[in-house]
Every structure is written in C-alpha cells, then in structure tokens.
Amino acid sequence: MSNINKKQTVIGETVPNVPWEDKPADCKTVVWRSERNPIIPRDLIPTSNSIFNSAVVPFNGEFAGVFRCDNTARRMELHSGRSKDGVSWQIDPEPLQFSCDDPEIGNFVYGYDPRVCWIEDRYYVMWCNGYHGPTIGVAYTYDFEEFHQLENALLPFNRNGVPFPRKINGNYAMLSRPSDNGHTPFGDIFYSESPDMCYWGRHRHVMATAGGWQSTKIGAGPIPIETTEGWLMIYHGVLTSCNGFVYSFGAALLDIDTPWKVLYRTRPYILSPQKLYECVGDVPNVAFPCAAVCDAPTGRLAIYYGGADTVVCLAFAQVDELIGFIKSNSM
C-alpha cells in the first residue's frame, strides 16, 4: 500500500509516528487488530484492577492520554499517562486531580470513559462524571499534569461526551448519549453546541439504534475525524443477547456543517468482540472504542478500544478504505 494518498482525504495534523502495523495479507476486514494486543494490561499500575476505555492524543512529538483505571476497591478513577510510541505506556500511579473554582462541581465521586481533544489552544477532556448520577464532566489541560475542571456540560443522566476537534457554526460542539442511572438498556446519539464550554444547547438528534449489533443502544466513540467526505465518526453499538450485552463498533459519515445529519452509516460492524481479551474479562464481549489517532497525509488510523472492560487494545484502518466500506455498506 502506498504511504501517500493521491488525494489527501483527512483534514488534520501530520502524525508521522502514529502507531501502525500493516494489514496482514490474509485479512479480509477493513479494520484489523494489533498483534501486540492487549497493549495495556489490567495491572500496569499497582492499584489497578483494570485499565480500559481510555483517551490518547499526540503530544509534543510523542503521545499522552487520560486513562480509566478502576482500582482494587473497584472505584472508577482517571489517570494521566505518557508514551513515546503510543503502544508502551507509563501511567501515573496516582489519580489525576482536578482544580475547580466550584467545590460542589469539583467534588470528585467517580469518573470513567474519558475522551481528549485538542481545540484551538488546549486539550479538553470529557468524561462520564459522577454528579447525582452520570453526566458529562469537562476539563482542560495544557500539559497533562495540571487539569482545570469546568462546569458539567449536561444534566444527569448522560454518557459518552465526545467533543469535535474544532468549532462548528462558531460554537464548540459535542456528541453525547442520554442514559439512565444504571446499565442503560437504551440510547441514541445527540449533538449539542456551546459558545463557551459552559452553556450547552441547540440539541439535535443524530442517530437512533438499528437492528442486529446496534439494536439496544449506540454511542459516539473517538473524537470525530474531519475528512473531505464528512466527519468520520466511529461509534459503538450494543445488542442484547441471551447472555447479556455485546459491544461492537461501526462507523458513519456526518455532514461537515450540520453534523446531526448522517450521510452514511455501516449496516455491518467493523469490529466485534471475538478475541479472548475481548470476550473474557470483568465484562465479557466488549469492544469499546474511545480514541483514534490519524496521520492526515497517509490516512493511517490507529483506534484505541477497551477489551472486556479490562484492558486497552489497538486496531488499525486506512481512512480511504474505511470511508469506501462505509459507503458500500450503508444502511
């Protein structure tokens, strides 16, 4: 495969050291797993019961991230981490601490499933924050050492807050999934805008559940990737089997200027829990995408996902091939 596309599809940054493994010759799928999976074991730090559903971004020529680390008391906490290559990670053994101007909002109860996104001049973090139930916490950092927490974006109950990497219609924008206070048996994807990362409105419905692998609930995954074909959104879908929930992921293209309008959406999944580290763990049968790093000139895409709510895994795709698959297999 050529390293340079004839026409660059991705509108974004150059990440020449994006984690990458060439597609195996016998691979028949548009997304393929890393041979090194799981790249982060459940016990990488002394206090962790599990590490999964975490966020990764390029940072100063290397990589940084915010990681969900459920500790051995089974408290859901967030930790910062660094990596030179995006595969081998050093995670701070101490949970990250947010500074906050409002002690009520800053009273940390729990946090999980973070997303991280560079917007204009800083890295914004969104995560499922405990405030009388799950809601969307918001913070920012410049260095992954100090984190300043802002107001929660939305009322409980909500999960999967995923910011867009630039303003849309002059406003910050995000995707989310309204939920309940437990293991939600429903969920569609919605879009919201904010002038200041504090007050959110202009809520729009994006996508509903569909059949098969995405019949019970859906939620946005990594930060959407801007392309010449629209916003590339990787999302998770859940079906309810006779043995419980099964989490897989698919992909969609959203309109650039009105991202609540879906242009194409995969009918089949692009990755489902089939490997041992996806099928066996604290929560069986889960492949949950939370981050993606893309090198714009080559279209190489590294997708970070949680396996069985226990470990962090890595998969790969080529953006042009993935977009072609979405269009050819759209519902």
Image (tube, rainbow, N blue to C red):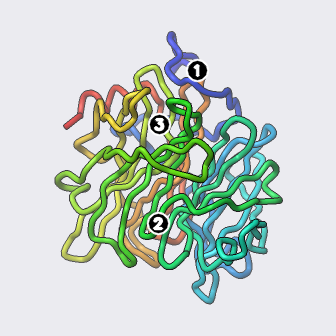
Q: Residue 113 vs residue 116: left or right?
A: left
Distance from label 3 to label 1 (Cα)?
13 Å
Distance from label 3 to label 2 (Cα)?
35 Å
| Disc 3, SS | strand
Instruction: Compare marks 1 and 2 and give the one earlier in the sequence.
Output: 1
Q: Which residue is mark 3?
A: 317
**Amino acid of disc 1:** Asn
Instruction: Compare marks 3 and 1 and give the one earlier in the sequence.
Output: 1
Quadrant in the rendering for residue 326: top left
Q: Is residue 34 visible?
A: no
How many numbered markers are drawn? 3
Q: Which residue is mark 1?
A: 3
| Disc 1, SS | loop
| Disc 2, SS | loop
The residue lying furthest to the bottom in this view is 73
Quadrant in the rendering for residue 238: bottom left
Q: Which residue is mark 2?
A: 155
How dense is the environment of label 3, judged by Cα within 10 Å: few (below 14), some, or many (20 and up)? many
Distance from label 1 to label 2 (Cα)?
45 Å
The residue lying furthest to the top in this view is 6
**Amino acid of disc 3:** Ala
**Residue 149 in picture, x, y percent from top left:** 70, 62
Query: Residue visible at 40% across and 35% down?
Result: 259
Q: Is residue 172 above or below residue 229?
A: below
Q: Quadrant of the C terminus?
A: top left
